[in-house]
Image (spheres, rainbow, N blue to C red):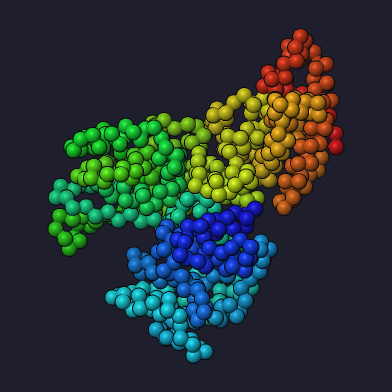
Amino acid sequence: MKYKTLLKLLDNICYEAPSNYKTYKPKIDNQDAVNSARSKCFIHLYLKVKMGLLDFKERQTYITEGPYDGGLDAYYINNEKRLIYLIQSKFRTNQNNFEEKELSLDDLIKMETESIIQGEEVDSNGNRYNSKIINMQTKINQIPDIARYKYKIIILGNLKRYNSTQISRIIGGLEYEIFDFERTYSELVLPMCKSNYYDTKEIEWIINISDNDFKILNQQFDTSIGKCNIHIAFIPLKSVAEFMLKFKNSVLQFNPRNYLDLARNSVNISIEKSISSNKTNDFSLLNNGITIVCSKFSHQSSTGSSNNTQVIVENTQIINGGQTACTISKIKDKAFLTNKKVMIKFISAPTDDYENYLRFIDTISNATNLQTKVTEPDRKSNTLVQRQLQIDIFMRYGYLYEIKKGEFGEVKDLLGKDNQIINRIILTKCITAFQGFCARARSESDSLFGEKFDDLFAKFNTSEIMLSYLCYSYLLSLKATKRNGYLQTQYGNALRYGKYAVIQAISVYIKNNIIKYDENGITKIANDLTQNILNQWNQFEIFIQTKITNSTYFNKNSDFGNYFKSKNAENDIDDYNWMS
């Protein structure tokens, strides 16, 4: 499913191309042309996610792939980092090859990077490099301090047969990075689905402030992860708007909400009104401000320009005040932002132990968002357990676990009817039932996201969590409706009231039987287990109606609706002898 998602993303990039880019508009029945277009879009995907190049035409200027390209398919010049990326890509047209086939020695040898970066105009066979390579050389030649730049080769493809020494020797000793199929899925496809177009660790916010009275309050504190510095400053709204428009979800990784969800929130109206209703800066007093966690905060007033201070914030993440930042970025008339500021608290923390750093951010995020109207599912969306589970589910099964409401909104229509997006509340209910609490799963929602929420998920491995969800999906696939009587003749009340009860019954059955979880065949395992329990459901309902303890529900009427919300249901499922 992951490869299928990749193809959909690549085809969508083709769709983004202007109509005059004919090579990106192949006829569907011309598979060779389709594969060629996807191959180019694979490079676009890297440039979009890793370099943050959102405009198709801008990305296209860096594509050099074609005849006489010297084995170089694309490049990118990062002036801020003084780094020039040289990209070689090998797209495979089917899943097996994409995940298993490696680049050959010939593929690497074709990269004549040394000749290209030294300004040679012809390749080793005497052929003149194509115009895009020549154009790249011209751009590099025009960099005034080129001696301070470094080169880095990016290889989009599998390359495990050679060790680092061998690869380095082949590519001329340049620094390199390999994006094999696993990195492609985890660092390109998943972030693309989440609209995270920037590497979180490399986000840098440079703020230029022209203000005689600009001040920064600094204070250092000893914390559980070392010394942290807090810097409080009033930052121009225009700078906030530009920053948020550029990075969007990438700077909301540790915020309970995502950009699209924030953009649709009704609170925006009151925030926007406080900004645009008058020319004075009442907004600075009325708004609670923004809280940002970063790895480094620095500022310099000696910038060579009078009354100018430059603030640099590295590894920037908004953990509170995302609603404010989003609203500022969405204001259409930027004139309303002039001469107005918002208070921002920057917390710079040491990142030596990155896992501990992430936990520290979780703590700060939870504390700061306790004072705002955030639902429990939103509040729990940023825990380390949930973020790791999201990655694991996608990497192993190709499903998109939506830990933040609407975070896959931009690709939802693109994914079509594959039911690939997993609703966080449904998954929590499924695993609650799988644990043995089907009544709670049926009767509760937000309360399931309490203090022990992460403990619930920690009790099961990803295969068990995924199995519980796929069993639920199979129940939905049977399409029991009022019109067909909820298929009561075949399955009793299982599909009307007892979906989570069925999942609990499956977990009981698994405990008493040896079930092997084959990742490639887990959907079939889930379907077979679910159907097995459904085949026994009518007998189970006969059993529960004969029990004296259930007379409240079945003495006068058949109240299955309330029965499956009761502790009785949980106990009866545990006691019943579910057969193979």
- Residue 283: x and y in percent read 24, 36
* 103 up-or-down from 240: above or below: below
Is 141 situated left or right of 31 in this image?
A: left
- Where is residue 222? Give x, y as percent: 36, 45
Identify the residue at horizontal 62%, vertical 66% (top origin): 30
Q: In the displayed structure, does residue 382 sit left or right of residue 398?
A: left
Q: Residue furthest top?
A: 556
Q: Decide if residue 129 is on the left or right side of residue 490.
A: left
Residue located at (50% from left, 32% from top): 376
Name the quadrant containing residue 322.
top left
Total numbered labels: 0
Residue 179: which quarter of the image?
bottom right
Quadrant the C terminus occupies: top right
Q: Nearer the viewer, residue 446 or 136?
A: 136
Mark yes or no: residue 537 visible: no
Q: Which residue in the rendered view is the most extreme toward the bottom?
A: 126
Residue 93 in the figure: left or right of residue 535? left
Q: Position of residue 228 (x, y in %)?
A: 35, 48
- Residue at the spot x=65%, y=50% of the render? 397
In the image, is residue 128 above or below residue 319?
below
**Quadrant assignment, res 98:** bottom right
The residue located at (46%, 83%) in the rendering is: 129
Give the x, y percent position of residue 234. Answer: 24, 44
Q: Is residue 274 visible?
A: yes
Pick the front one: 218 or 414? 414
